[in-house]
Structures are given as structure tokens and as C-alpha cells.
Image: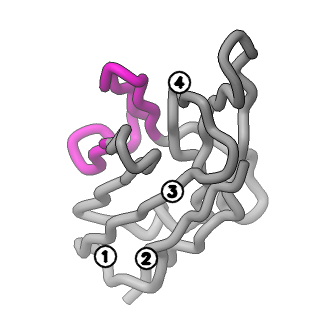
């Protein structure tokens, strides 16, 4: 199973970015998907998560600014980030709980990370 994340880059404060992450390779089904981030010198933290039935959860620091969504047909999760702040600067990682065959268990897989830099 591979998770390919893309969409990061340099943006000015107040700007927007949209991250995407597509899962591929021997997937039977995907349960929860999510985005985490890790800033320099800090621990990785949950940004947002979404279940298969699209129930969402957000870190307090991004509520009202970020929106997570998913396309189950494409095994893809998105993160729309608006009103970006310098403190949002981090490497963003996608995560998915994947079952590889019927009767199997869900295991977590990670994408390679995409850098988001918010700076003027």
C-alpha cells in the first residue's frame, strides 16, 4: 500500500492551500483517513481525521480554517487549508487505516509528507 501526498508549498499568511493524498496498491477497504503535521522541534500532531462515513475531527488550532474531505471511490483524502498562519508551517503527513483483504484487519499506513511553509 502506498500513500502519495502532494499539494504543499510556500504561501503567504492568510492564503490557502489544498493537500491531496491518494492511496493505492492492494486495498480492500479504507477505514479512517487523516492528516498529521510535524513542525521543526515538535512532535507529530493530529490535524484532522475523517471516517468512512465522513464523520470528522479537528485539532482546536485549525477548527474553522481547515476542512477535511474524502473520495472513497478514489481512495483519496483532501485537506483544504484557509486563513493560513505562520504557525501552520510543518511537514504534513497523510494517514489511512487500510484493510488489504476481506477478513483482514485495518493497519495504519503513512504518506511521505509534504512541506507547507507559511511566510511573507
Residue in view at x 21 percent, y 41 percent: 64
Q: Position of residue 116 (x, y in %)?
A: 51, 72
Q: Is residue 59 magenta?
A: yes
14 relative position to 75: left or right: left
What secondary structure is marked by label 4? strand
Q: Is residue 44 above or below residue 116?
A: above
Q: Which mark is residue 13?
A: 1
Residue matched to label 2: 118
What secondary structure is marked by label 1? loop
Residue furthest to the front in view is 102
Q: Position of residue 119 (x, y in %)?
A: 43, 83
Residue in view at x 26 percent, y 71 percent: 16
Residue matched to label 3: 22
What secondary structure is marked by label 2? strand
Q: CA distance from mark 2 to mark 3?
A: 24 Å
Q: Earlier in the sequence, mark 2 or mark 1?
A: 1
Q: Earlier in the sequence, mark 4 or mark 2?
A: 4
Camera-nearest residue between 103 and 10: 103
Q: CA distance from mark 3 to mark 1?
A: 27 Å
Residue in view at x 32 percent, y 70 percent: 17
Disc 4 or disc 2, which is closer to the eye?
A: 4
Amino acid at each position: 500500500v502506498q500513500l502519495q501526498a502532494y499539494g504543499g508549498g510556500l504561501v503567504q499568511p492568510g492564503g490557502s492551500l489544498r493537500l491531496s493524498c491518494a492511496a493505492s496498491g492492494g486495498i480492500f477497504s479504507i477505514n479512517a483517513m487523516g492528516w498529521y503535521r510535524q513542525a521543526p522541534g515538535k512532535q507529530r500532531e493530529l490535524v484532522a481525521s475523517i471516517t468512512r462515513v465522513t464523520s470528522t475531527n479537528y485539532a482546536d488550532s485549525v477548527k474553522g480554517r481547515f476542512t477535511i474531505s474524502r473520495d472513497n471511490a478514489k481512495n483519496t483524502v483532501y485537506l483544504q487549508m484557509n486563513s493560513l498562519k505562520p504557525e501552520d508551517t510543518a511537514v504534513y503527513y497523510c494517514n489511512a487505516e487500510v484493510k488489504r483483504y476481506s477478513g483482514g484487519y485495518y493497519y495504519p499506513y503513512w504518506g511521505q509528507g509534504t512541506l507547507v511553509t507559511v511566510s511573507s
